[in-house]
Amino acid sequence: MNSLKRIEEKMVIEIMSFILETFNTNNIKNDLNVCSELILISRILQKRIRENQGIKTQKNPFIDHELKEILEEIKKDDHYNLIKDFVYYYDQNLRNKMIN
């Protein structure tokens, strides 16, 4: 379990580093809002990684509510079909790479 936690932490840190690097490249000021957004992203990532590894996670009503809101917003978007197709083909491409 300890090694899984280290792998999870490493994955989240790598993603957070990429986001911060992108922010710095684009001169986005790192303030309290950015910090809170990164914390939210990291919590979502940790939850997703743990669930993918078969580890039960606690429900977070705030995150669940926000995810539902975002999905509803995406469904109303003019480009909804493009977004849906992108997600589908991206997933298929990943599956094909894993098979080959």
Image (cartoon, rainbow, N blue to C red):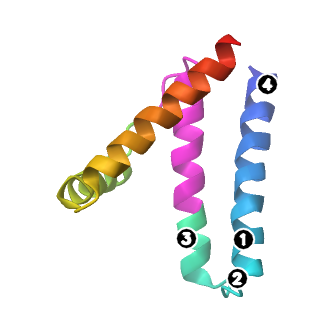
The spot of residue 43 in percent (x, y) is: 55, 49
Amino acid type of the residue tagged 2 in the rendering: Asn
Q: Read off the residue under disc 3.
A: 36
Amino acid type of the residue tagged 4 in the rendering: Asn
Task: First in sequence, mark 4 or 3: give its number.
Answer: 4
Image quadrant containing the C terminus: top right
Q: Is residue 92 left or right of residue 25?
A: left
Q: Is residue 33 left or right of residue 97?
A: left
The spot of residue 57 in percent (x, y) is: 48, 30
C-alpha span from label 2 to label 3: 19 Å
Q: Read off the residue under disc 4.
A: 2
C-alpha span from label 1 to label 3: 17 Å
Q: Are marks 2 and 3 in contact (CB under 8 Å)?
A: no
C-alpha span from label 4 to label 2: 36 Å
Q: Read off the residue under disc 1.
A: 22
Q: Read off the residue under disc 2.
A: 26
Q: Is residue 98 left or right of residue 73?
A: right
Task: First in sequence, mark 1 or 3: give its number.
Answer: 1
C-alpha span from label 1 to label 4: 30 Å
Residue interval drawn in magenta? 39-58
Q: Are marks 1 and 2 in contact (CB under 8 Å)?
A: yes
Q: Residue at x 25, y 57 (%)?
A: 69
- Residue nearest the observer in this picture, 79 or 63: 79
Q: Is residue 40 above or below residue 82?
A: below
Amino acid type of the residue tagged 1 in the rendering: Thr
Q: Nearer the viewer, mark 4 or mark 3?
A: 3
Dividing the picture into quadrants, the one containing residue 97 is top right
The spot of residue 89 in percent (x, y) is: 47, 34
* Dominant SS in magenta: helix
Q: Residue at x 36, y 50 (%)?
A: 83
* Crowd around label 1: few <14 · some 14–19 · many ≥20 (10 Å): few
